[in-house]
Image (tube, rainbow, N blue to C red):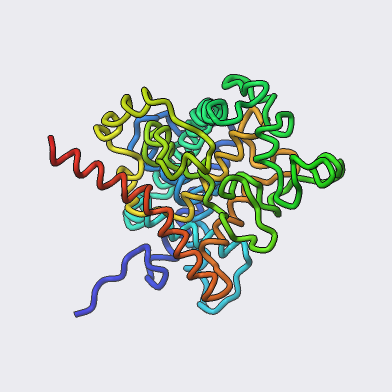
Amino acid sequence: MSQSPSPSDSNSPYATQNALKRRIAALEEQNAELQGESRSKNSRGDIYVTAGRAIRRLVSLTDRIEDLVGEHDRRSSLCDEDDQHTEEEEQLYQSFQQLLRWVPCVRNLLNSQSDGYQLNVAFQKLNRGADSARGDDASSLKKTVASWLNESRPTPDPPITSVDKSGRGFYHDTTGELLCPVDFNWVDPRKGYETEPDFQVTAHSWPAFLYSNGKYDRDNPMKGLFKSVLLVRTFKHIFTSPSSAGKIQPDEEELLGYQEPSHKRSRTSGERRTRSNIATILGMRSVQARAIAYSAVQLRFALSSCGAWRIIDDEFDHRQFYIYIIDYFEQPPTSAAKASIDALLVWWNRWNVAQYSVANTSARRRQ
C-alpha cells in the first residue's frame, strides 16, 4: 500500500507549491520591513525561540533559517537531481539536513498547513533564539576563559581582566601565544609573529590553542590537533555545565599546567549532577563535529581583543574558520584521514558527553 507524499519530501507534488508560498511570504515580510510595518512580536519565551538555541551550537554559525529552507526549496524545484551545486549551496544544504536533525519543529513546520507568513514569523523566532544563545555563550566565556588563564601556570602578567577584552588578543603574551598561527613561534623572537609585521592572521592557519598544550609538530601536523584542554573545557562549559568545565581531570592537569584548588573539587563534586545539561536537552548523546567547531569559534572570540561579536575580526573570518573545522571532520580526503577523525571523536567522547550522561543517569537512580 503506497503512502501519501509528505510536503517536505523534495519529490512530493506539494513541495513546489509550499516553496512558492514561503517565497511569497518572505517577499511580503521584506516589503513590510521596508515600510516599517513588520508584524513580528517579541516573544522570548516562545517555543521556537527556545528551539532555536540549538542552531548556532549544532547547525550553523551564521546562516539564517530562511536561507537553509530556501536552499531546500530550490533543490525541490529542480527537474534534474544531478544538477551541479556551488560550494556555498552544498554548505547550506548540509546545514539544512542538520537543522532537521537538531530542530525537529522545523520539519513539522514544513509539513504543516501554515501559511507563508506564519512560517516566516516562526523562522524569525528561531533565528532570534539562535543568535541569543551565541551571545549568551560569548558573554559567559568572556569571564570564564579569563579565570582559567589567570589560574594557569605561569600566571599571566599582567592578569587578564574579565571585564575589558581590549587587553587580550595580540596585546597580551598569554592570549597572543594561544592565538598565534602555528606557522609562527610566539616565544622565539627569531621566528616570531612580531618579525613579520605584514603577516595577516586569517582562518587559513590553525591557531595554537587548537593543539594539545599549544604544541605544533611540523613533522606531524595532525598530532594533538583539536586536543587542547582549553578547547575541551570550552566545550564542557557550553554543552555540559560551567562547573564540569572547572573540574580538571588528573590527566588534564599536566597538559594545562594547572593544579585545581582542593576547595573547588569538593564544592562542585555533586552540584553539576542535579541539573539537565545542554547536551541532554538537545538530545546530543555523542560529541558532534559542529559542536567542536562552535566551541573553537567561541574560544577564539574569548581570547581575542574584539569587544563585540562580529563575523570578521580584522582579517580573521570566524565563519570561514568554522567551515574549515567542519570540513576537517566531515569531509576527510582519504580512508586513513577518516580513521584518524573517528579516533579523535572517540577521544572526545571518552570524557565528555558520554561520561556526563552516565553521571546524570547515576544521579537520577539515587534520587
Which quadrant is the N terminus positioned in? bottom left
* Residue 10 location (% of width, % of height): 42, 69
* Residue 203 location (% of width, % of height): 68, 50
The residue that appears at 33% across and 58% down in the rendered structure is 111
- On screen, residue 10 versus residue 134, left or right, reads left
The residue that appears at 53% across and 39% down in the rendered structure is 256
Determine whether 77 is above or below 228 in the image: below
Determine whether 32 is above or below 71 in the image: above
Which quadrant is the C terminus positioned in? top left
Q: Quadrant of residue 53?
A: top left
Choose between 57 and 45: the one closer to the eye. 57
Q: Quadrant of residue 264?
A: top left
Q: Is residue 309 visible?
A: yes
Q: Is residue 113 visible?
A: no
Determine whether 147 is above or below 343 in the image: above
- On screen, residue 125 versus residue 312, left or right, reads left
* Residue 82 location (% of width, % of height): 54, 79
* Residue 225 location (% of width, % of height): 57, 55
Tell how many labels. 0
The residue that appears at 70% across and 50% down in the rendered structure is 182
The residue that appears at 60% across and 74% down in the rendered structure is 84
- On screen, residue 9 versus residue 133, left or right, reads left
